[in-house]
Amino acid sequence: MIEKTAAELSQALANGEISSVELTQSYLDRIKKYNEELNSYITVCEESALVQAKEADKKRVHSDSSPLLGIPLAHKDIFCTNGVTTTCGSRMLHNFIAPYDATVVGKLNDAGVVMLGKTNMDEFAMGSSNETSFFGPVRNPWDTNRVPGGSSGGSAAAVAADLCTMATGTDTGGSIRQPAAFCGITGFKPSYGRVSRWGMIAFASSLDQAGPLTKSAEDAALMTNVMAGLDKKDSTSIDKPVEDYTATLNDSLEGLKIGIPKQHFAEGLTADVEKGIQEALCEYEKLGASITEVDLPNNHLSVSAYYVVAPAEASANLSRYDGVRYGYRCANPVDLEDMYNRTRSEGFGEEVKRRILVGTYALSAGYYDAYYRKAQKIRRLIKNDFVETFKEVDVIIGPTSPHTAFELGTKTDPVTMYLEDIYTIAVNLAGLPAISIPAGIANGLPLGMQIVGRDFGEAQILNVAHQFQQQTDWHRQKPNFGQET
Amino acid sequence: MEWESVIGLEVHVSLSTKSKLFSGTASEFGAEPNTQANIFDLALPGTLPVFNEEALKMAVRFGLAIGADIGKHSVFDRKNYFYPDLPKGYQVTQLDFPIVGKGSLTITLEDGTEKVISVTRAHIEENAGKSLHEEFSARSGIDLNRAGEPLLEIVSEPEITNAKEAVAYLKKLHSIVRYLDISDAIMAQGSMRCDVNVSIRPKGETDLGTRTEIKNINSFRFVEKAIKSEIIRQHEVIEDGGEVLQETPRYDANKDITTSMRSKEVENDYRYFPEPDLLPVVIDDSYISAVKAELPELPDAKKERFIEEFSLSTYDAGVLTATREMAEYFEEVTQGCGDAKLAANWVTGDLLALLNKNDIEITESPIQSDRLATLISRIKDSTVSGKIAKTVFETMIDDSAAVDEIIEQKGLKQVTDSGEIGKLVDEVITNNPDQVQQFKDGKEAVLGYLVGQVMKISQGKANPGKVNELLREKIK
């Protein structure tokens, strides 16, 4: 049962084949058995999960038929969960117990989900390998010597290893899509403003967006149905009605125009991944879609622009961690200056400090125009590239990452690590929705395909992803890890 | 060499919205520390700001009241610095696109002339909390009740040339924001406070000298004194062959001097950038005209009307419109007694003297407007003379009884009965034969003396008109 999608489990629960308590217990058992090796959870909420499961089973008796009722999930530890430690993968918040629920958490709770625990992540979502976590790296269930991707690495690994049915994640520059690609699961980043950021610990406010990590596009649609919507507590959330994203999953792709950005098939892309994506595109042609090459001329500027805008925003967003009100405070500060210095030096890890410094520099008097203002200009150019391209095509498809999961500890140079997100970052700068789905296996490792849609074109890319998953079974492939024989 | 001083003011006015600028927390003065701070005010991870539109409306009201350009697309920015009472590590303010652009207001100088002072801009920002250093030994306390309260920072052009003008400008701002009902503007409580920029330069020079900034002055009197002493300090520095440095000197109210605080502190780089958690504030003409339609009558307009409608002197009209409460009080008295001229005399005269003497606000006046109106009515209907009315007024301060009751009880009612006054007149004629003769001889002025004598023995109660009339009749 534990390997099933949420949609399938929903059926099983409705038919009485299994109860939520039984299902929850099996996941808890697996977590006990396998989490030590994977390190995908920071916190496991055994007791409260069983209470929630019992509650869900009770509701079902009273004919509650919410599709996610009783489905066990995990939250990335970036979402505030009332009464539960919320660390953001940092020593700074290792002891922070949130006194409130993030909007996303509240909405999913209302839909009757069971929270198994909080998943590991790169510290403050800064990283592409989950190696920056204060709580140690997460391992990829496909090969435990390899990284699961980041920053939502814990969520991706947990879904892939069947330590939950589905999980939440956040994506600032690829943090849902890249780990989904590395772990062979489905990861969906909705349009900026589609899902509330209230209660989601900020990294870069103008780029951060929450989304689901799941075992299928259909599950992503089910979760997005619950997560999306206007939230008056988040001024940047958008007042647009939420569609039923499951309603159009089965629409035909006959006549669909797919754009292939030449910049995503250029130098740097490994042959394995390219081959896998080309084969996947053939599936779309079989479904009646047409494929044309498109140009995103400013794509090569996206990583540079991102590494100005995101650190700049982060440098301010992380100022609140000063040891005054909550979280880590250094021992025996001699004065205020000392408290600030040591609290922040000791509380933050290397990558977080690096980005705070970069952001602080980019915003400094005399450098603002050269960096921050210029990056904002590039951001507009990148957005415009997409606007122009979407006049010609319906969706843009390419690889999620240039390669499959790499080995732990092999990417030590920050810039090499930053280039991990070369295909995903532009999408955040433009605020567009995008999904990564498994599209093949190369040398025993999954590879991911990214589908980018128009602003608020969530329904369309979910439909395009789902149709692919109706034709192929890449999303059904499982790592050997944790397979009981 | 003759020198002149150039002064610019940055005034922070605390907007009296029901809740804070971005968090929905109530914000009342004087609550227990940290009882008015929610998860956003404490800058807990994951919390986000939501702009309070009441603050927007108040800022637009102010902008319209000073004839300013209203920013139809204003933007919030983050101003970054670390301080324990600044929970987020940045203050949300407006840098390049403020809600209120260039406007102006008119001040009246002591000699009665008017001067227009330009306002450069006014923007919305959030207040910081309060650090308490005294109450704790070797520790500091932080009270975040005030953190996130909406402020309007109003920046003047450097067009003020002396301390008195600065105070007149401040008082005018004070008056306007109170007329608009957008702030209590109580300097002693910090809901209005001001930073003063002062520089001096040789008279006729167009370039500005190096300015210093005296921060957080919290009374009109201190503003005047601080400016005066800072101008003196700068003169002394230059006379001693020195150079005025850009710094923030401290004003010591006890010693009445400003002292240089030359420190090694490097200038802060606030690293402003647009606040990504908030959208730009976009307003249209219909919003602006709706706010405009709700504007109350402002001090200048009211002053004009008082001059027109009630034939008051410019001076009296100025005094009576200086605060909204004063103007309301005056209009209530006028309405109650039907005589604006008398009302103006009483309010600007005896009443104001009483308030000033006891240092109380007109809203706290022991003599309410309706009672003063009744008193004036009693002068008009000849129940009491103007002189006796002053006695009644004095009694009214401590006696809350009805005016008529006081007059009755104290037997202060004016005597108008011809018979009764006649007796007194006869008595005076008998006792003052010389003066009576002089009057008969045509010395008209003596009549005043005789009237006075009658008034005296009537203990002021006789109707002076009647006395006059009877004296003339009887001496003839």
Image (spheres, coloured by chain):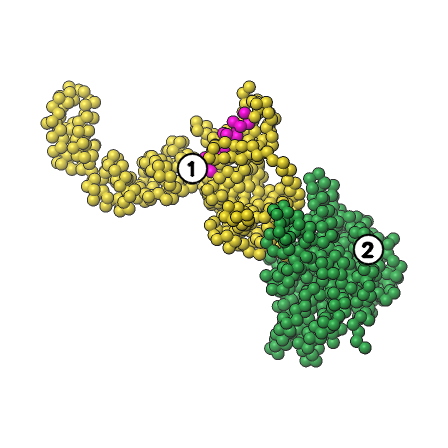
Chain colours: A green, B yellow
Three-letter residue code for mark 2: Lys
- In x, y percent, where is residue A129? 77, 58
Secondary element type, mark 2 = loop
Query: What separation in Å lies between label 2 and label 1 (alpha carbons)?
Result: 71 Å
Residue A6, image quadrant: bottom right
Three-letter residue code for mark 1: Ala
Which span is picked out in magenta?
B219-236
Q: Which residue is mark 1?
A: B322
- In x, y percent, where is residue B291? 52, 46
Question: In the image as oriented, which residue stretches furthest toward the left?
Answer: B430
* Front in this rendered view, residue A485 or B370: A485
Tell me which residue sits at (69%, 44%) in the image.
A363
- In x, y percent, where is residue A1? 74, 76
* Front in this rendered view, residue B464 or B169: B169
CA neighbours of label 1 inside 10 A, class few (<14), some (14 to 19), many (20+) = many
* Front in this rendered view, residue B113 or B18: B18
B222 part of magenta stretch: yes
Q: Which residue is mark 2?
A: A411
* Front in this rendered view, residue A37 or B358: A37
